[in-house]
Image: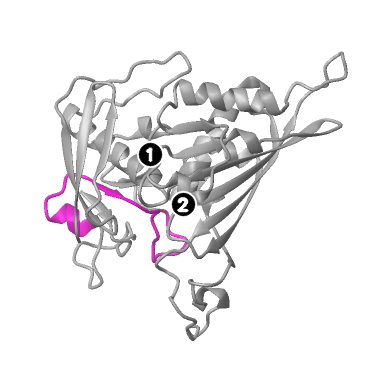
C-alpha cells in the first residue's frame, strides 16, 4: 500500500484513531505501507516506533528489513534530490572532506498554501503561510537537512544549513547546493577540486551506479524542460563553479527536479518495488550498490504490483531496474 494523501503521517496513531491513521491500512490487511512524505508525530519528544523506517531508493534502501519495517517513509522531494547530489561527493576521497554545506531550494507551490490571502490561525508564528500562493514569492522553512541526516548519518558531521523559497509554479523545483571542501594546494599552485573535477564526478555517477536516478546535463534548462523527468535530480553542469580561498573551496551546483510528474513519483515507485520485492523474497537485505556495480538480490522475479492512493491522481509510475519491472497503478483516494 502506498499512502499519498498527506493526511495520515503519524506512526504513533492507533489504527482506530478518530482522525484516521497509517496503521489503519495495516489493520485492514496491508503487509507494509510506503508513505510519500516524512513522518510527523503528534507525540512531541517521543521516539518514533521501531517498525517505521525512512528510506530512499539508491541511498539507504538496503537497510529495509521485511520483518521489522511495516511503515516506510520515502522522505520528501527536496530531500531525495539533495541526497542524490551529496552521495557522489561523499563517495569520493577527493571531495569527502567537507567543512560546511548549505542548500537553498526554490520550490513550487504546495497544497498547504491558500489560493488567496487568508486570516492566520490563532497563535500562528509564520504569517507568510497564510498568504496567497498565486502571485507571491515567500520564504518558508524546510527540514531537508535534518531528514538527510536520517538516511546519510555522515551529514551530521558537516555544518549543514538549508532554506527555502516558494514560488507560484505548479511543479519542478531548483536546489542550489554550496559546499566548502578542505583540500591541499598542488605543487604547481593549482588546486585539486575544480569545476571540471566536480562535473566529472557527477557525470561518472550519472553513467555509473546512480544511472537513472541522477542525470548530468550541460544544457541551459528552465523549469518547464524538467516536467516529466524521472531522475531524482538533474545536475546542470554549466552552472557549476568553484572559488579558491586558502584551504577551502565553495562549489555550487544547480540541479532541477520534477516534483510531481516525474522525479519523486518515480523514486517513490522504485522504493515501493523494493519493499514489495522484499515482502516476496523474505527478510534478506539488499546490499548497497558500490562503484564496482555490485549486483543486487532479487533479480529475475515476476513483476510486483502495488496500489497508490492520493494526490498523484491517475498518473502511472513505471520503474524498472535490469530484469525487475514493476507497475504502480494509481487510484484516487
Q: Position of residue 84 (x, y in %)?
A: 50, 36
- Name the side, left or right, on which 229 lies relative to 25: right
Q: Position of residue 209 (x, y in %)?
A: 44, 22
Image quadrant in which the C terminus is located: bottom left
The mark found on residue 172 in the picture is: 2
The answer to whether residue 125 shows anywhere in this view is: no
Position above or below: 295 against 305: above
Q: Residue at x 86, y 31 (%)?
A: 246
In magenta segment, residue 281? no
- Viewer-closest of 332 and 89: 332
Q: Residue at x 40, y 30 (%)?
A: 212
- Viewer-closest of 228 and 273: 228
Please tell me whether mark 2 sits on a helix, a strand or a loop.
Answer: loop
Principal SS element in the magenta part?
loop
Q: Position of residue 185 (x, y in %)?
A: 83, 21
- Name the side, left or right, on which 302 lies relative to 6: left
The boundaries of the magenta stretch are 23-47
- Viewer-closest of 305 and 221: 221
Which residue is labeled 1 in the image?
230
- Name the side, left or right, on which 263 lies relative to 140: left
Q: Residue at x 22, y 54 (%)?
A: 314
**Can you tell which quarter of the image residue 59 is in?**
top left
Please tell me whether mark 1 sits on a helix, a strand or a loop.
Answer: loop
Position above or below: 294 against 145: above
Asked whether the residues under the numbered discs 2 and 1 touch, taking CB atoms below 8 Å apart as contact, a structural biologist would say no
Position above or below: 264 against 112: above
The answer to whether residue 84 shows anywhere in this view is: yes
Amino acid at each position: 500500500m502506498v499512502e499519498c494523501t498527506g493526511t495520515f503521517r503519524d506512526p504513533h496513531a492507533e489504527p482506530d484513531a478518530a482522525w484516521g491513521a497509517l496503521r489503519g491500512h495495516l489493520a485492514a490487511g496491508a503487509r507494509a505501507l510506503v508513505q510519500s512524505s516524512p513522518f510527523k508525530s503528534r507525540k512531541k519528544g517521543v521516539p518514533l516506533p521501531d517498525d517505521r523506517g525512512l528510506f530512499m531508493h539508491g541511498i539507504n534502501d538496503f537497510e529495509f528489513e521485511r520483518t521489522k519495517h511495516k511503515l516506510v517513509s520515502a522522505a520528501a522531494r527536496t530531500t531525495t534530490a539533495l541526497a542524490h547530489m551529496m552521495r557522489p561527493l561523499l563517495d569520493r576521497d577527493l571531495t569527502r572532506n567537507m567543512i560546511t554545506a548549505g542548500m537553498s531550494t526554490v520550490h513550487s507551490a504546495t497544497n498547504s498554501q491558500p489560493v488567496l490571502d487568508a486570516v492566520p490561525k490563532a497563535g500562528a508564528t509564520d504569517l507568510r503561510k497564510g498568504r496567497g500562493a498565486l502571485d507571491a514569492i515567500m520564504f518558508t522553512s524546510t527540514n531537508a537537512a535534518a531528514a538527510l541526516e536520517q538516511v546519510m548519518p555522515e551529514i551530521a558531521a558537516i555544518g549543514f544549513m538549508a532554506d527555502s523559497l516558494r514560488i507560484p509554479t505548479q511543479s519542478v523545483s531548483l536546489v542550489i547546493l554550496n559546499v566548502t571542501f578542505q583540500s591541499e594546494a598542488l605543487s604547481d599552485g593549482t588546486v585539486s577540486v575544480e569545476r571540471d573535477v566536480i562535473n566529472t564526478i557527477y557525470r561518472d555517477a550519472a553513467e555509473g551506479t546512480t544511472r537513472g536516478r541522477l542525470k548530468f546535463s550541460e544544457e541551459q534548462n528552465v523549469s518547464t524542460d524538467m516536467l516529466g523527468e524521472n531522475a531524482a535530480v538533474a545536475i546542470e553542469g554549466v552552472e557549476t563553479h568553484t572559488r579558491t580561498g586558502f584551504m577551502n573551496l565553495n562549489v555550487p551546483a544547480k540541479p532541477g527536479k520534477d516534483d510531481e510528474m516525474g522525479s519523486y513519483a518515480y523514486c517513490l515507485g522504485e522504493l515501493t518495488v523494493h519493499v514489495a520485492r522484499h515482502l516476496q523474497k523474505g527478510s534478506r537485505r539488499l546490499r548497497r550498490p558500490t562503484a564496482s556495480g555490485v549486483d543486487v538480490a532479487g533479480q529475475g522475479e515476476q513483476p510486483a504490483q502495488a496500489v497508490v492512493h492520493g494526490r498523484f491522481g491517475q498518473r502511472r509510475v513505471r520503474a524498472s531496474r535490469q530484469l525487475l519491472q514493476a507497475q504502480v497503478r494509481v487510484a484516487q483516494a
